[in-house]
Amino acid sequence: MVLGRLVHYAVDVVLLSTVIAGVKRSSGFEPQTSAISEPTMRSVAEKFLGVGESVFEMAQATAVNSSYFKRASR
């Protein structure tokens, strides 16, 4: 039961990080990690955002190479 909750929270954190990465890619806005004064917490925040970037890139690569997705015309 505890392990299930831990996995659930980990997945939630990865999803939140991925959404933040998507916002960064689409709008250019990103969290200002330099405003975090404690070096350990700043490092954790940067790793958190890096995981989201990696997941977003994998999802984007999957969509680009899939026949189920096509680029929308603007």
Image (spheres, rainbow, N blue to C red):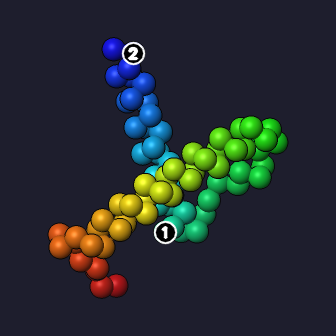
Question: Which residue occupies 58% across, 68% down?
Answer: 28
Is 3 positioned to the left or the right of 22 in the image?
left
Q: Which residue is mark 2?
A: 2
Q: Secondary structure at mark 2?
A: helix
As rendered, which of 20 and 6 lies closer to the eye? 6
As rendered, which of 73 and 43 lies closer to the eye? 43
Is residue 19 something one can see in this rendering? Answer: no
Amino acid carrying mark 2 in the image: Val
Pointer 2 local density, CA inside 10 Å: few below 14, some 14–19, many at least 20? few
As rendered, which of 20 and 8 lies closer to the eye? 8
Question: Which residue occupies 79% across, 41% down?
Answer: 39
Q: Secondary structure at mark 1?
A: helix
Up-down relation of residue 42 to residue 70 (above or below): above
Q: Which residue is mark 1?
A: 26
Up-down relation of residue 61 to residue 4 (above or below): below
| Image x and y of residue 26, in percent | 49, 69
Question: Which residue occupies 56% across, 53% down?
Answer: 50
Question: Which residue occupies 39% across, 29% down?
Answer: 7
